[in-house]
């Protein structure tokens, strides 16, 4: 079955630690996205990538980093510079060659302890 | 002004009711409109995808786009308790990299 897999489902981070969230897709989609979801604020774009080895900052990129070494994978690192990292993180992907809808993974809930 | 505005609710209806969920937007270049359903602690699931103005029907769900008013709607007929979720609208324009989302409307269907 094609889809987007995010792992882990739940993640706990200590103050000052970097953590990496995984996102893998087997839909052969070129574009991939990371969103952060907080109660009452909807989805906010962190980073996106249209092709391998290229990515762009979204609206709230500070304190986050990404890489896109393979088409299938778009990991997100939440660094210690992110002051309020507790949130629900969503990865999405879509085709780039035509205008289509985006599909989401099941999300990772990150909590700072 | 936000690009996309959506009433956050919450909205509670009895089982069997017709539900109307709405979003307004400010960017007249938006041409692609989506509705997602999100259950608690899950990723959004695509429900409907429409291009430009008009209606699209899929079972109990109807998506409506009125570009002249910059207004989109999702109607749910014969609502069921399993429809209880948060509904997000999203939209984008040709050639754009990003999707713009509403904040979501939380719906509860009471048996």
Image (cartoon, coloured by chain):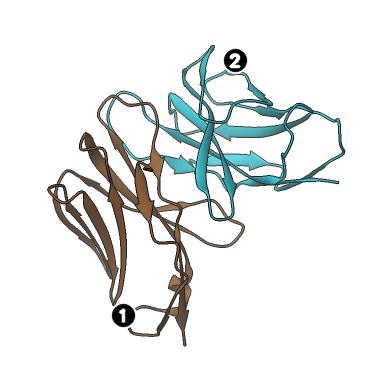
Label 1 belongs to which residue?
B78
Furthest residue toward top: A53
Using the numbered discs, state the Cα–Cα distance from disc 2 to disc 1 in whole angstroms. 47 Å
Residue occupying image coordinates x 72% and y 43%? A8
Chain letter of mark 2 equals: A
- Residue B105 in the image: above or below residue A37: below
Q: Quadrant of residue B2?
A: top left
Residue at the spot 61% in from the left edge and 46% down from the top edge: A107
Q: Position of residue A54 (x, y in %)?
A: 51, 13
* Residue visible at 74% across and 34% down in the picture: A83
Q: Are marks 2 and 1 in contact (CB under 8 Å)?
A: no
Q: Residue furthest front?
A: B1
Q: Nearer the viewer, residue A40 or A4?
A: A40
- Classed neighbour count for the residue bearing mark 1: other residues with Cα under 10 Å, few (<14), some (14–19), many (≥20): some
Whole-percent x and y of residue B77? 28, 75
Q: Nearer the viewer, residue A83 or B90?
A: A83
Could you say which quadrant of the image residue A69 lies in? top right
Residue B63, x across and y down, in percent: 24, 59
Query: Secondary structure under badge 2?
Result: loop
* Vertical order, B16 against A36 (above or below): below
Residue that label 2 marks: A69
Chain of the residue on which disc 1 is drawn:
B
> Count the marks: how many?
2
Residue A15 image position (x, y, % from top left): 86, 36
Horizontal arrangement in the rendering, residue B29 relative to residue B3 (left or right): left
State the cyan chain: A
Q: Which chain is brown?
A: B
Q: Residue at x 36, y 43 (%)?
A: B1
């Amino acid at each position: 079955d094609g889809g987007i897999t995010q792992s882990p489902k739940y993640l706990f981070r200590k103050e000052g630690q970097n953590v990496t969230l995984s996102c893998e897709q087997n839909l052969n989609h070129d574009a991939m996205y990371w969103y952060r979801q907080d109660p009452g604020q909807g989805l906010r774009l962190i980073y996106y990538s249209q092709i391998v080895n290229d990515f762009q900052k979204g609206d709230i990129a500070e304190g986050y980093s990404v890489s896109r070494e393979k088409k299938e994978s778009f990991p997100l690192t939440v660094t210690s510079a992110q002051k309020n990292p507790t949130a629900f993180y969503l990865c999405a992907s879509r085709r780039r060659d035509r205008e289509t809808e985006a599909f989401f993974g099941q999300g990772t809930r990150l909590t700072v302890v | 002004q936000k690009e996309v505005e959506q009433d956050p609710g919450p909205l509670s209806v009895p089982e069997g009711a017709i539900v109307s969920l709405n979003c307004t937007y400010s960017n007249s270049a938006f041409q692609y409109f989506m509705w997602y359903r999100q259950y608690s602690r899950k990723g959004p699931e695509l429900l409907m995808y429409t291009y430009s103005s008009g209606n699209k029907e899929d079972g109990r769900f109807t998506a409506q786009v009125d570009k002249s008013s910059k207004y989109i709607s999702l109607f749910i007929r014969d609502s069921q308790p399993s429809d209880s979720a948060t509904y997000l609208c999203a939209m984008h324009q040709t050639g754009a990299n990003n999707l713009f989302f509403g904040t979501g409307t939380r719906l509860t269907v009471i048996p």
